[in-house]
Amino acid sequence: MRRFEGKVVLVTGAASGIGRATAARFGAEGARVTCADKNLEGAEQTAAQIVAAGGDAVAVRCDVSSPDDAAATVKGAVERGGKLDVLVNCAGIGGFRRTTDTSFEEWNRFLSINLTGPFLMCREAIPHILKTVGAIVNVGSVAGLHSHPYSAAYCASKGGVVLLTKALAVEYGRKGVRINVVCPGGIETPIIQEFKLPEGVSQAALQKIMPLGRMGQPEEVAGTIAFLASQDAIYINGSAIVVDGGMTA
């Protein structure tokens, strides 16, 4: 499919995992992709893969928790492509930690990257996406919909992303901009290495995230993100789409 031929797409967290798979998917469907990540080397590898496959992509360094970086990244994508049709907020962090062991700095880091980051990127991108009547897809988590132990900061940040998405969707839906959030379950990405259970907790707790007997793959989430950003999902707005293999069934 070439649903994004002539479209300009900005993907954060594009250095690895769901972000990389999503950038590659948009590139394969004809989009001009800006691959943004704090890890510039990883973002450059993603962009190079897209170009090698016949697509159009560039990489930029972006710390989504920085207002200046968010503004500069959106401005650069618009200057390069002449417009902005789609924003995908994939950048995020995760990890298990007992609540009583969670420092103030860790709490703030989760919120600044997982929640403030999407807010800043949306704030900068919406004026441009209004012009193209485009779409925004945020990446949340099933942890933003259901409780998970040892994940207070992560759940709070991802729950915030879900409600941020819904608030923006009703604010801008009548103006033609659709904003949705994808909530993955256990996906085999580099971030999963951060989800190490606290000492003394049974590893059996991890089996819950593999209802199909395996972890999900980044490409399986990327396909849903591309669908939500496309005209195929024209009547979907403000929805939290779960991609978890039945984890929350």
Image (tube, helix red, strand yellow):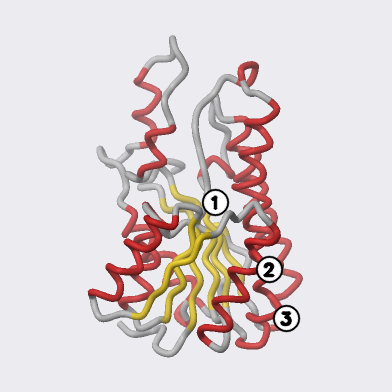
Q: Is residue 162 above or below residue 8?
A: above
Residue at position x 63%, y 61% in the image: 69
Q: Tell me the SS state at disc 3.
A: helix
Reading the chain from its start, which is encountered first: label 1 or label 2? 1
Q: Residue at x 63, y 65 (%)?
A: 238
Q: Position of residue 154 (x, y in %)?
A: 58, 37
Label 2: few (<14), some (14–19) or many (≥20) C-alpha neighbours in 10 Å: many
Instruction: Describe residue 53's horizontal placement relative to residue 129 as left or right.
Output: left
Give whichever of 210, 195 is nearer the camera.
Answer: 195
- The reply to whether dot 3 and dot 2 touch (C-beta < 8 Å) is no
Q: Amino acid at mark 2?
A: Ala
Q: Mark 1 to mark 2: distance in Å?
A: 15 Å
Residue furthest to the top: 200
- Mark 1 residue element: loop
Work out which quarter of the rendered image holds the C terminus and state it: top left
Residue where numbered disc 3 is placed: 174
Location of mark 1 (residue): 140
Q: Rate crowding at label 1 as few (under 14), some (14 to 19) or many (20 or more) other CA atoms within 10 Å.
A: many
Residue type at mark 1 is: Gly
Residue beneath the point at 40% across and 23% down: 205
Locate the N terminus and report the quarter of the image it occupies. bottom left
The numbered mark, 3 or 1, whose residue comes first in the sequence reads: 1
- Residue 220 horizontal/vertical position (percent): 33, 58
Q: Is residue 236 above or below residue 32?
A: above
Please determine whether, in this image, residue 205 is positioned above or below residue 27.
above
Residue on which disc 2 sits: 169
Q: Which image quarter: residue 107?
A: top right
